[in-house]
Amino acid sequence: MLGIGRRAMGPLGIAAATLALASPAHGEDRPDRAAFVSLYRELVETNTTPSRGDCTRAAAQIATRMRAAGFAESELVPFSVPDHPRDGGLVAVLPGRDPKAKAMLLLAHLDVVEADAADWGRDPFRLVEQDGYFVGRGVIDDKAQAAIWADTLIRLRQAGVRPRRTIRMALTCGEETSTAWNGAQWLAQNRPDLITAEFALNEGGGGRADDRGAPQMLAMQVGEKAAQNYTLVATSVGGHSSQPMPGNPVYALADALTAIEGYGFPIRFTDTTRAYFTAAAGLSPEPMKGAIGRLLADPADAGAAAIVTRDPGFNATLRTTCVATLVRAGHAENALPQRAAANINCRLLPGDTVAGVQATLTRLTQQWVDISVNQPVRPLAVPPKLDPRILGPATALAAKHFPGVPLTPFMSTGATDGVFLGAAGIPVYGVPGLFVDRDGGGVHGLNERIRVSALYAGRDYLYDLVRAYAG
């Protein structure tokens, strides 16, 4: 996923129940669990990075397992394009018994962020179980979700279950970078017949655990921000460094970046974020609790905003954000720079536009730099409704699997492939269930990890959730 893998869901100081995971013991002998770990291991140990990986191979491995479980060739549709033979994916279909019931879609991506063995100190594409964790690139983002979806369909087929509605699954490639061929986008634009659904379940939700692994909060993603990059450029004719002159592009760029750093976009609530902050207020100590309440009543309350936005997760949920991520300048150590450029990565609240944010950045920096919109321009996220038909079963099953742990809708501050489905008219919800450590579990960084008990508990919860939605 672009940005943080499993997004932070608020301040680390939230006071919440710390209950043991309501799942079978780690050592319990369950043949279905062994089969799941075999699939999960094969998926994690197949390199699917943009540089050297092969999503097509990973998709084919899953298709082989689904054939062995009884799926017909007509129910398995591998896809790719000639220009990107290693970026393929898989669509699988478990037919429903009611032709009037609209299908549901399970979406996950197979590609992962780059990982260097020299940085990790070992092979990041070997699944290791260590100190109660599964460790390896992609163990959370997003191969846990992909493995659970494939495993769920396999279990349903092996059990002879005929759901009321058809269940479709799309495993795609290209989510982790904006410059690659994107399978979810291609399906939405070229083969919508393969993914047509009343709603889709995707990554982006999840859960947060405390330092002991006890669950604190569950989240159902209902909407997300849109990711967009902009480029700032300052130029001059340059010259010899022994004779400094006004108009140095490095200083001009620095002034522009300082202006962006100091600017706060307006605070604005959506239906989802209002519900989220209402729940967060009830779980927060003072003064955060009171500040959230005042901000809900008046988003322009500067005093309340100053308190709430100290938390980076809360700040990013409340407003559009822009941050410098890359800087390039100069051409020689003894020459005045002729060019200085920076990439600005923005995350847009639903309702904001790419052009509108560009206009704001231009207003802040036009005396120093030129600003342009980077390609590609992804679709803006379409927030789905707070639909009780979606939130109801998720909440009821959470009470069964994770008693006492609150579940709240929230808006992801990052971006997923859900934007392509939303643009095609398919509401997308990021499912809860997979609890990740408070630091994010190393997603996109070193030693990505998930607790073994959390993975097993999330798998059981999501299996029951799919069955509930599918009837």
Image (tube, rainbow, N blue to C red):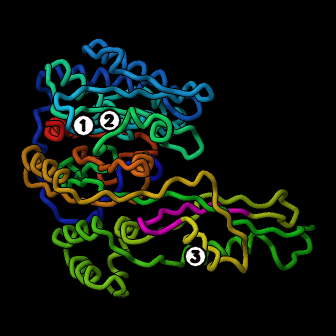
Dot 1, how many residues are within 10 Å of its Cα: few (below 14), some (14-19), or many (20+)? many
Tell me where residue 135 appears, x and y as whole percent: 36, 34
Q: Earlier in the sequence, mark 1 or mark 2?
A: 2
* Picture disc at residue 455: 1
Q: Which residues are magenta?
A: 341-353
**Magenta run includes residue 352:** yes
Dot 3, how many residues are within 10 Å of its Cα: few (below 14), some (14-19), or many (20+)? some
Image quarter for residue 449? top left
**Which label sits in the foreground, 2 or 3?**
3
Q: CA distance from mark 3 to mark 1?
A: 43 Å
Name the residue rendered at 27%, 49% in the picture.
Answer: 206
Vertical comparison of 402 with 259: above or below: above
Q: CA distance from mark 2 to mark 3?
A: 39 Å
Q: What residue type is disc 3 on?
A: Thr
**Magenta run includes residue 331:** no
Q: CA distance from mark 1 to mark 2?
A: 8 Å
**Which label sits in the foreground, 3 or 1?**
3
Q: Which residue is mark 2?
A: 144
Q: Which residue is mark 3?
A: 360
Name the residue rendered at 22%, 65% in the picture.
Answer: 14
In terms of depth relative to the viewer, which is nearer, 237 or 286? 237
Tell whether 226 sits left or right of 403.
right
Q: What residue type is disc 2 on?
A: Ala
Tell me where residue 112 appears, x and y as whole percent: 47, 37
Name the residue rendered at 20%, 59% in the picture.
Answer: 408
Tell me where residue 143 appears, x and y as whole percent: 37, 34
Q: Earlier in the sequence, mark 3 or mark 1?
A: 3
